[in-house]
Amino acid sequence: MIYLREFTIPPKKVDELVFTPSKPKNPYFIPETNIPAYNNHYPFIIFRNRIVKPVEFSNITIFCGDNGSGKSTILNLIAEKLEINRSSAFNRSSFFDDYLKLCSYDMSSNFSSNILSNSKVITSDDVFDFLLNLRYANEGIDVKREELLSEYVESKNKDFKFSSLDDYEEMKKVVDSKRQSASKYVKDRTMKNIIGRSNGESAYMYFTENIRESGIYILDEPENSLSVKNQIKLVKYIEDSARFYNCQFIIATHSPFVLSLKEAKVYDLDSTPMVESKWTEIENVKLYYKFFKDREEEFK
């Protein structure tokens, strides 16, 4: 499903006028750009020669390029302009909002407030935080398990006499410890580890739990924390979500597996100006191909 049809960033002339006081008065001029203290004008300049026309979107649209090419920046601009939900912070900079005001977009008639509420930005930081929280939770559970095991041994060997209702909980511990095995005693008093899978499997689970029906999903380098096997699983999940569940995906990636998404529109930000390319024409993919092609005999 296509909700976002087109996104337009400031053209080169406007980008230049932001830095240029002139007469008659220049409506685009931002005085702070001429103050030496503001030596970082990001995201101005970065796309000046790179994106020269409105970006058109498919149900799956991918931006690829080296670090610093602007692929995460274009995702952040889209997300902020559309006011899509996000959890992690990003490099906003002093001039981000000024640049954002000069951006525009075109939505299809299918877009609605319900679609927006379902939509989400998912970054590698979000996945990392999720994995970290799981680890902390499990560490807490493991500590509790050790405490309960000590409690079991102590209760099992305790000579206890019930004297009032105030002793009920203590009596229950003693009775249970004498009737149950240590593992049963501990299991009944604590939940299982939240995570019984690898980091890669848990990272994949994060995507499947956060991508719902009918929404725009902006994924910034989703391959991070995923094994090749789980990247391939995620590719299939994205394809199915776009095809059957009315989702639109806008993705920044280095991964050849993610780039191979069926029917995706792929933009190469390493090209100046940016061009739409076949995924097999992307330099990063060709390097992978050459690497394995050169070692083809080793696979026989």
Image: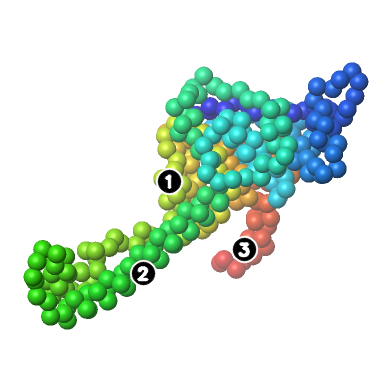
Residue lying at the far right in this picture: please name it.
23
Question: Residue at the location (48% across, 40% down)?
Answer: 239
What amino acid is labelled 3 in the image?
Glu
Mark 2 and mark 3: Cα distance apart in space: 50 Å
Question: Residue at the location (61% across, 66% down)?
Answer: 297
Q: Earlier in the sequence, mark 2 or mark 1?
A: 2
When the figure is inspected, residue 180 is found, relative to residue 235, above or below; the finding is below
Q: Residues within 10 Å of mark 2 (few under 14, many from 20)?
A: few
Residue 153: where, in percent of width, then height?
Answer: 22, 78
Residue 258: where, in percent of width, then height?
Answer: 56, 47
- Whether residues under marks 3 and 1 lie with C-beta atoms below 8 angstroms apart, the answer is no
Q: What residue does disc 1 label?
A: 208
Question: Residue at the location (52% across, 44% down)?
Answer: 87
Q: Nearer the viewer, mark 2 or mark 1?
A: 2
Which element carries disc 3, helix, strand or loop? helix
What amino acid is labelled 1 in the image?
Thr
Q: Residues within 10 Å of mark 1 (few under 14, many from 20)?
A: some
What amino acid is labelled 2 in the image?
Val
Which element carries disc 1, helix, strand or loop? helix
Which element carries disc 2, helix, strand or loop? helix
Is 238 or 80 nearer to us in this picture?
Answer: 80
When the figure is inspected, residue 283 is found, relative to residue 248, above or below; the finding is below
Q: What residue does disc 2 label?
A: 143
Q: What residue does disc 3 label?
A: 296
- Residue 35 occupies quadrant: top right
Q: Earlier in the sequence, mark 2 or mark 3?
A: 2
Q: How is the image coloured?
A: rainbow
When the figure is inspected, residue 20 is found, relative to residue 155, above or below; the finding is above
Dot label at residue 9? none
Task: Tell me if I can see residue 123 in this picture.
Answer: yes
